[in-house]
Image (cartoon, grey):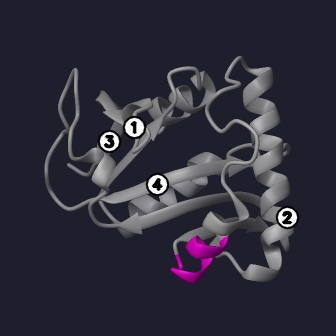
Amino acid sequence: MNIRPARTEELSRIEEIYASARAFMREQGNPNQWRTQYPSLELLSADIAEKRLYVCEEEGELLGVFYFALGEDPTYRVIEDGAWLSDTPYGVIHRIAVAARGRGVASFCFSHCFSLCPNIRIDTHRDNLPMQRALEKNGFHRCGIIHLENGDARIAYQKEEG
C-alpha cells in the first residue's frame, strides 16, 4: 500500500468511497455521523487544494481516503470528561474512510500519519464502534469529549510517542 496526496481527477472515486463508508456506518448502527452528503464536494476540493486530503492506494486502486494536517484544530481546544495526553504540537486525522474491500487500510493510514508526527489526535462519533475499536487497536487513548463547531459531541482520542 502507498499513501499520497489526493488529486482533483480522483474526486468521483473519493466520493464513492465516502458513500460506501456512510452506508457501512448506517448498517453498523451509526446513521447520524456523516448523514447524507458529508463530506461535501466543496470541502473535499478545498482539502485537495490545501494538500490535506490523502489517499491510500494499492496497485493503482484507491482503498481509502483521509484528511491529515499538522497544527492546532480549533475543536480540540476544549475537552470535557477527561484531558489530552499532552499539549505538545500534534497532527490531526479527520474523515477517514475505507473502501469496502480495504482490510487493514485504516491501520496503514494511522501508521503513515504517526510516521509524520509523533503526536496524533482524532475524534469519532459515539455510535461509530468500528472506528473506536480501530483506534484502540492502533494504540490511541480515549481522552474525553470534544464538540464540533455545530455543537455535536465526539469522542476524542490521542496517540503519542513515548
Q: CA distance from mark 3 to mark 4?
A: 10 Å
Mark 3 or 1: the one toward you? 3
Residue at point 74% right, 48% down? 37
Picture quarter with the N terminus:
bottom right
Identify the image quadrant of residue 42.
Answer: bottom right
Residue 139 - label: 1
Q: Position of residue 79 (x, y in %)?
A: 23, 34
Front label number (1 vs 2): 2
- Determine the CA span between mark 1 and mark 2: 30 Å
Which residues fall within the magenta stretch? 45-51
Taking depth in this image into account, of 52 and 34 the one nearest to the observer is 34
Give the quarter of the image for residue 122. Answer: top left
Which numbered disc flags the more N-terminal residue, 3 or 2? Answer: 2
For residue 56, the mark is none
- Pointer 3 residue: 158
Amino acid of disc 2: Arg
Q: Nearer the viewer, residue 91 or 16?
A: 16
- Residue 93's disc number: 4
Label 2: few (<14), some or many (≥20) within 10 Å?
A: some
Given residues 139 and 41, the one toward you in this image is 41
* Secondary structure beneath label 1: loop
